[in-house]
Image: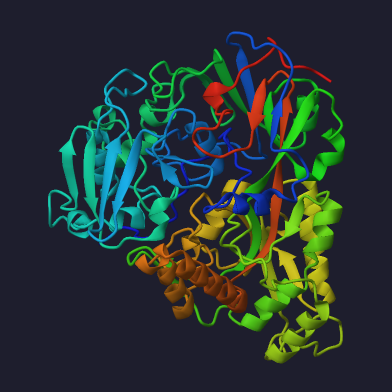
């Protein structure tokens, strides 16, 4: 096969999803309670006032970067594009507050574990695309086939697709159809797969969930998807809540309700979504210019007492981490290739870098206690599977120094900075993305802490790097980068496949036999058993801590500001939330100012 086989599938949920989750357990309400018990702010709010008819909802996406303008989630691969696309696009499947697939979406899935069959059935027979054309199972099958095309350059063709029987032959041109896809009727298809795995049960897991309009894209070559007007302009056709009215490229989109939306026409007349700088969002919210915005944690003191907003909180489904440049990505073989001689190949060096950082103090002092030290690469968002007892890389500079001594990194010339194992000058080139002024302070503090244990760490290019350029450098495995500070949104599927050997988002290019074996165990049929699943996840977390291919730094509380003219809002993440964006009502014509 010439295509990627295990790239990351993001959940059918974006930064813009108003149905944000406070509950994060996948088995029971006790998991939800464990995840939300330490939240600083409530998870829902009801404001006084009678709802008006219609009005414009103003939504701010807080970001220092611009969007690229892609409006179909089959191609969008960053949070900003996905946020805008999420208003016109819709995932096939709905899910409950525990992230489990249910029948609240466009389709449902029935699993036959023994026969290795997935029956995908539309939940209605009169669904329509936003242009009024009928939506049928043919659109779903078409999307799967086209994403397997040799010219598809997106990041969504992953093990959700390669797991389908006959996919390899289809991709290699040895078959003109995918034998594992059977169309039963206009509303039903059966997928026969090679392996069943527990991730199939979750939103954003390993059941193909993207869908695009066949009547539009059948006439557009796959290689031209990204430049098509149907992927970037008001002509974009979807199954989502809204249609596009106006676009300011990379900055703002104004939407109008999709009268064909399968859950009913949204209650507002228009939705305006803007990208707003972290530097100005507080003043914008104070002025009442926006109704909903995810706020910077480091600026809490400047907005927590505003009288025109209410703050709600939730456990974030993302984390900050430190990782390293271990090798390259073989595009032909579609897998990571680890260089055993990479500068950061010594595990004790990596562990020392983790122990040198006082994330507890940094989270308290810089982020108002809303950033919490992360002890595992499987964060507490996944409360039922997270190993809360794992030691993690707690601040221990003496242990860091001991590890460096044992590894042979010693201060030969007495200047306080360690040389390499051969006694030669040793410098670690660090890449970090440009975010906020607080983050700039945090990065400099990291560098200072590393210096205290004798490591010379310098920023690559001498400064933090613009977001899109930063990730381009990581994807290309820029040889000038030894280590990097990044963030990762987990989606709803707990399987940490991003760290797998064939996952294109494994930008560290780290591969080990033990890590691969444990990832495969978590994705196996045996993990349908709850006890075995917990055991497999615990083993992976322990090994990830041991191998230190990535050092988890922070998980956080997400704080969302809600203008008091929004009637009701909650952070429940199921598809049937009462504050889904199509259900939001306003109590005044204009935003309430401070």
With 115 as the anchor, is 426 left or right in this view?
A: right
* Residue at the limit of the structure toward the left, as seen here: 175
Rendered image quadrant of residue 359: bottom right
Q: Whole-percent x and y of residue 377? A: 60, 64
With 415 as the anchor, is 510 left or right in this view?
A: left
Q: Whole-percent x and y of residue 489? A: 57, 51
Compared to residue 505, the image places residue 203 above or below, namely: above
Compared to residue 83, the image places residue 11 above or below, namely: below
Residue 375 in view in this figure: yes
49 or 409: nearer the viewer = 49
Rendered image quadrant of residue 442: bottom right
387 or 463: nearer the viewer = 387
Q: Whole-percent x and y of residue 462? A: 73, 59
Instruction: Give the residue at x 63% y 26%.
Output: 59
Instruction: Give the residue at x 64% y 21%.
Output: 58
User: On the rendered image, what quadrant is the C terminus found in?
Assistant: top right
Q: Whole-percent x and y of residue 414? A: 86, 87
| Colouring rule applied to residues | rainbow
Instruction: Give the residue at x 52% y 39%.
Output: 574
How many dots with numbers? Answer: 0
User: On the rendered image, what quadrant is the N terminus found in?
Assistant: bottom left
With 228 as the anchor, is 448 left or right in this view?
A: right
174 or 24: nearer the viewer = 24
Residue 433 in view in this figure: no
Compared to residue 133, the image places residue 364 above or below, namely: below
Compared to residue 443, the image places residue 13 above or below, namely: above
């Amino acid at each position: 096969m010439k295509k990627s086989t295990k790239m990351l599938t993001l959940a059918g949920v974006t930064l813009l999803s108003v149905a944000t989750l406070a509950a994060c357990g996948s088995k029971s309400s006790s998991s939800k309670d464990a995840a939300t018990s330490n939240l600083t702010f409530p998870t829902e709010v009801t404001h006084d006032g009678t709802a008006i008819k219609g009005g414009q909802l103003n939504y701010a996406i807080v970001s220092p970067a611009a969007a690229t303008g892609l409006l179909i989630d089959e191609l969008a691969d960053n949070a900003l594009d996905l946020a805008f696309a999420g208003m016109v696009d819709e995932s096939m499947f709905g899910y409950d507050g525990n992230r489990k697939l249910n029948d609240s979406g466009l389709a449902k899935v029935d699993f036959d574990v023994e026969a290795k069959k997935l029956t995908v059935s539309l939940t209605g027979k009169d669904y329509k695309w936003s242009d009024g054309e009928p939506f049928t199972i043919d659109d779903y099958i078409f999307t799967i086939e086209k994403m397997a095309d040799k010219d598809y350059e997106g990041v969504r063709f992953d093990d959700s697709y390669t797991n389908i029987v006959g996919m390899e032959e289809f991709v290699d041109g040895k078959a003109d159809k995918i034998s594992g896809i059977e169309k039963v009727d206009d509303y039903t298809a059966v997928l026969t797969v090679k392996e069943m795995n527990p991730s199939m049960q979750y939103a954003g897991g390993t059941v193909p969930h993207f869908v695009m309009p066949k009547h539009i894209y059948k006439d557009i070559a796959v290689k031209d998807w990204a430049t098509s007007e149907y992927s970037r302009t008001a002509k974009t056709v979807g199954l989502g809540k809204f249609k596009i009215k106006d676009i300011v490229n990379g900055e703002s989109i104004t939407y109008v309700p999709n009268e064909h939306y399968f859950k009913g026409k949204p209650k507002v007349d228009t939705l305006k979504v803007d990208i707003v700088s972290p530097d100005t969002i507080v003043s914008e919210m104070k002025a009442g210019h926006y109704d909903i915005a995810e706020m910077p944690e480091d600026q809490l003191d400047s907005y927590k007492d505003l009288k025109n907003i209410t703050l709600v909180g939730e456990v974030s489904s993302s984390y900050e981490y430190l990782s390293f440049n271990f090798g390259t990505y073989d595009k032909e073989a579609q897998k990571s290739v680890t260089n055993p001689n990479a500068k950061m190949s010594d595990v004790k060096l990596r562990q020392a870098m983790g122990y040198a950082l006082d994330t507890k103090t940094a989270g308290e002092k810089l982020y108002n206690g809303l950033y919490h030290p992360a002890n595992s690469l499987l964060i507490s968002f996944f409360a039922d599977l997270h190993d809360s007892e794992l030691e993690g890389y707690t601040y221990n500079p003496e242990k860091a120094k001991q590890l460096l001594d044992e590894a042979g990194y010693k201060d030969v010339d007495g200047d306080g900075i360690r040389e390499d194992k051969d006694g030669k000058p040793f410098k670690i080139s660090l890449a970090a993305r440009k975010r906020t002024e607080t983050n700039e302070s945090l990065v400099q503090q990291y560098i200072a802490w590393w210096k205290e244990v004798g490591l010379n760490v310098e920023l690559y290019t001498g400064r933090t790097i613009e977001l899109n350029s930063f990730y381009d450098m990581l994807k290309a495995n820029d040889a000038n980068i030894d280590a990097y500070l990044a963030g990762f949104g987990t989606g709803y599927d707990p399987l940490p496949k991003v760290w797998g050997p064939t996952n294109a988002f494994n930008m560290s290019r780290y591969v080990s036999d033990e890590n691969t074996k444990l990832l495969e165990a978590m994705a196996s049929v045996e993990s349908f058993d709850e006890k075995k699943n917990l055991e497999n996840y615990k083993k992976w977390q322990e090994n990830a801590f041991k191998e230190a291919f990535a050092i988890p730094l922070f998980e956080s509380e997400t704080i969302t500001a809600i203008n008091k003219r929004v009637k009701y809002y909650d952070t429940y993440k199921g598809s049937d939330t009462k504050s889904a964006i199509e259900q939001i009502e306003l109590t005044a014509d204009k935003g309430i100012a401070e």
